[in-house]
Image (cartoon, rainbow, N blue to C red):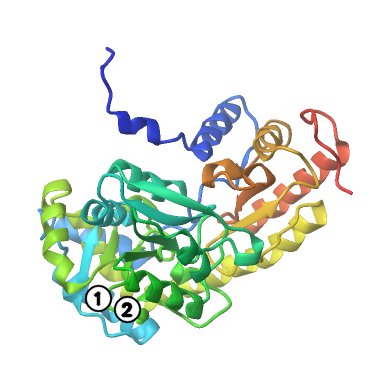
Amino acid sequence: MNFSPLASRLGNIAPFHVMELAKMAAALERQGRSIIHMGIGEPDFTAAPAVIEAASRAMAEGLTQYTSALGLPALRAAIAGHYLRTYGLQVAPERIIVTAGASGALLLACAALVEQGAEVLMPDPSYPCNRHFVAAFEGQAKMIPSGPAERFQLTDAMVRANWGAATRGVLLASPSNPTGTSIDPAELGRIVASVTERGGFTIVDEIYQGLSYDAAPFSALSLGEDVIVINSFSKYFNMTGWRLGWLVVPESLVPHIEKLAQNLFICASAISQYAGLACFAPESLALFEERKAEFRRRRDYIVPALEEIGFRVPVKPDGAFYVYADCSALADDADRLTIDMLEQAGVVLVPGLDFGSHAARQYIRLSYATSMENLQEAVARLKTYFKRGTGLAPGFTLPK
């Protein structure tokens, strides 16, 4: 059955290339091919044992009914305790809203703040869903080209230069997907001050903040209570499919977010919320730190390995589990290159086209959220692929 007319906003939502590559990879696997997945950003670790036990206990005890739209009071308090313990920040539990993943948090924030025609500044490249949340509420994501000199992030100067009559705020991610790079805290402070001076909002996606490797723990919440922060149990806490996240907002915004949450979600999964409480148990936190150290070990292997093949990594990632690599010395089109590497070498990487338009055909994103054995095998396959030089799409050249 065909539905007509469809909402015009659908035209503003682009396909997600990583998911298309995942479908192509699945088809090859059904043919018996061995495929190494380094496309989707999902930890290869699963939930901690204490988390699984807590979920089982919640189900056994019948704790499966609706919770408050703002989340379990105990979980909100536990998240507040996490900010105090990790960042030395006093965050009132009343400012914390438990959501259906970071996606739910972004949806609620955009529903509350983005109007038709409102412009939101973001760096190009950025995680594609962020701009699509803005588009879903008929706003306009203004993508500002950002390169290695800016660590693929926005700077205060870029924000001030691009702020216009329709601009309502900025949406940032630190560390970022796809680049794994963070914004220097001092620079972020300058951005927040400029946005506040102009009466705008600052949303900072900190979903990868727990996976920061090279600097002291930092949260944008230290820059003032007007900053809106999004986080999740998916990445550091290894709970992607549990769909549990949170949103920290100014106290004045809480009743408005609550009204939206009541109508759009009712609440986050009760079972996931009870399970999430166990993330803050000492044994769970110790495990997460061990896994974080393993991610760092993988980063420290894969970056020089890529450079040895012929990729260029202009900014070493300091967080998350991604490398944003320049492939221009190897090929003239990252999109075709990723398809060819999948078909010829059985390795899934993601083209820069997913993340924006600025130099997009020059970059690929690699996720090192897979085992060291898989990373080593992928590197071996890619070395063979480029040395062989057969089957490459037109325009490809071998590494220098």
* Dot 1 crowding, Cα within 10 Å, few <14, some 14–19, many 20+: some
The residue tagged with tag 1: helix, strand or loop?
helix
Mark drawn on residue 235: none
Kindly tell me whether residue 341 is visible in this rendering.
yes
Residue 322 at x, y percent in the picture: 58, 57
Q: Is residue 228 above or below residue 69?
A: below
- Seen in the picture, residue 180 relative to 364 is either above or below; the reply is below
Does the residue at mark 1 contact the one at mark 2 (Cβ under 8 Å)?
A: yes
Q: Which residue carries the number 1 mark? A: 78
The answer to which image quadrant residue 6 occupies is: top left
- Number of numbered discs visible in the structure rendering: 2
Q: Quadrant of residue 150?
A: bottom right
Q: x, y percentage for residue 373?
A: 67, 55
- Whole-percent x and y of residue 149? 65, 65
Q: Is residue 61 visible?
A: no
Q: Residue 203 versus residue 70: which sits nearer the camera?
A: 203
* Mark 1 residue type: Ala
- The answer to whether 356 appears left or right of 129 in the picture is right
Three-letter code, disc 2? His
Rendered-image quadrant of the N terminus: top left
Compared to residue 232, the image places residue 346 above or below, namely: above
| Residue 259 drawn at (x, y percent) | 10, 56
Q: CA distance from mark 1 to mark 2?
A: 6 Å
Q: Which residue is mark 2?
A: 82
Q: Residue furthest bottom?
A: 88
Task: Name the residue at the front extreme.
Answer: 165
29 above or below 126? above
At 26% from the left edge and 63% from the top edge, which residue is drawn?
A: 275
Q: Is residue 256 left or right of residue 336?
A: left
Q: Residue at position x 48%, y 78% from top?
A: 185
The quarter of the picture where residue 390 lies is top right
